[in-house]
Amino acid sequence: MSPDTLRNSPSYLFYQTDHSRPTLDRAEGIYMWDTQGRRFIDGSSGAMVCNIGHSNPAVLDAMRAQMDKSTFGYRLHFVTEASEALAERTVELVWPGMNRVFFVSGGSEAVESAMKLARAYAVAVGEGSRWKVISRWPSYHGCTLGALSVTGYDSLTDPFAPMMQAMPKVPAPRAWLDGLDPADPATGAHYADMLEAAILAEGPDTVLAFLLEPIGGASTGALVPPAGYMEAVREICTRHGVLLIHDEVMSGGGRTGRFLGGQHWAGAPDILALSKGFGAGYIPLGAIVARGEIVEAVMAKGGFAHGFTYAGNPLACATGLAVLDEIIRQDMMRNAQVVGDHLKRGLTGLMDRFPFIGDVRGMGLLLAIELVADRATRAPLPPAMKAYDRLTEAAYALGLIVYPRRSRGGYEGDHIVIAPPMITTIAQADEIVALLGEALTAFATACELPLS
């Protein structure tokens, strides 16, 4: 569909793009086809959602079977087998002791639910002075006003700032950008100390929670925390009575090599948020998972004053259960680790050809490349160049879908997320690297950037 046609379409706000886009016909595995028969590689799993690939037969069968039984059952009227089974399976895959689940329909709902549960717990245990949720800058936690209040991405939050209570932010642990060694535990301590300083500055008795993505998503481009950071923030939160919330909307679901990104380090959160790969794009689905004592304290004081119409929808839960079953049956987390390591080596190899690639980072099949004007100084490319967008369009023209974002808080910097489904093979990873190399060449030529 042409840009002019899109602008005149009733659904224009839904698509929000000025680029030509074809009409989707079908999708299977890591591939998608338009109605003209052109094939695309889904190199970003949509928005890092379709973790198990498209049109998985077992998931489709499970959806049909549930549709034959029921498609809706309101959670205050019925217990459903699907929601109970998915809750049990979810608890098996997360941290020990996190044994209470509340289902939602997406990532923004999950993050808001996690924050509200944290607040309900503080009130229940007599700590009503705690209400501030510290998060990081840059970060992205959702598009609703509550989720935006903890988002550190200026181009998304600035227009809505008068409508919300912005929460305190601390710097994200971007060791590479700050010229620090991510393998040095002193680097992790450096960023963790900023959290403790913020807690003390705000007043420990006012701080409710600290919210982070264990492995960065779109806003920081697959940022892996430096050594010691995750363990240090857990200890700081415990010492000050602050709840630790992991936003696993993007890093959860297995694509980093473990079901949760945070499981690569010691120190469980108190509450975690799941979505995206949890339903793998087959149906809107998300969840929060919490330690039992948190939920029990809230329930003892009258319950959680919160909910959504589609929470625990049986069709959504049956779909999610089938997704988790396929992740386990096909050993997709292991494949994500092996193929992800291979893909990362391929992306790192592109740095030898393209001096404007400043960094390759990530874990498993959640990877990113950052573009710079100067690799030594890490200076960003001129914002007016819109490098993140132009490179994405160059890849799209070649049949490769990647995910672009500004890397430095919304107004400057450029990175591209490469996160294909967990069923990707070594050969397909090589094809992704080859196509991205072609796209980088076309982009560099158009922008008159140097080639080595």
Image (spheres, rainbow, N blue to C red):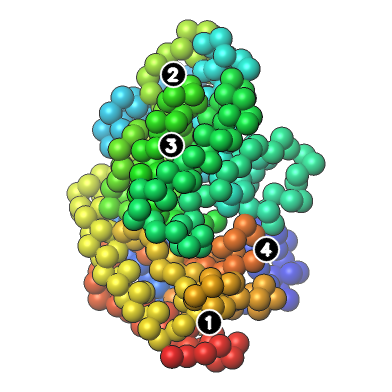
Q: Which label's residue is closer to the chain start, 4 or 1?
A: 1
Secondary structure under the numbered disc 1 in the rendered image: helix
Q: Amino acid at mark 3?
A: Val
Residue 372 visible in the shown view: yes
Whole-Å distance between the Cαs marked 4 and 1? 21 Å
Residue 213 visible in the shown view: no
Q: Amino acid at mark 2?
A: Ile
Secondary structure under the numbered disc 3 in the rendered image: helix
The residue drawn where x is 31% and y is 59% is 364
Whole-Å distance between the Cαs marked 2 and 3? 20 Å
User: Does residue 230 appear to the left or right of 405 in the view shown?
Assistant: left
Whole-Å distance between the Cαs marked 1 and 3? 40 Å
Residue that mark 1 sits on: 394
Residue that mark 3 sits on: 233
**CB under 8 Å between discs 1 and 2:** no
Q: Which label's residue is closer to the chain start, 2 or 3?
A: 3
Residue that mark 4 sits on: 411
Q: Which label's residue is closer to the chain start, 4 or 3?
A: 3
Q: Position of residue 206 (x, y in %)?
A: 62, 23
The residue drawn where x is 25% and y is 58% is 337
Residue that mark 2 sits on: 294
Secondary structure under the numbered disc 2 in the rendered image: helix
Above or below — where is 448 with respect to 117? below
| Crowd rating for badge 2 (residues with CA inside 10 Å; few <14, some 14–19, many 20+) | many
User: Does residue 16 appear to the left or right of 200 in the view shown?
Assistant: right
Secondary structure under the numbered disc 4 in the rendered image: loop
Q: Quadrant of residue 427?
A: bottom left
User: Does residue 441 appear to the left or right of 30 in the view shown?
Assistant: right
Q: Give the label, 1 or 2, closer to the camera.
A: 2
Above or below — where is 362 with respect to 100? below
In the depicted view, which residue is nearer to us: 362 or 97? 362
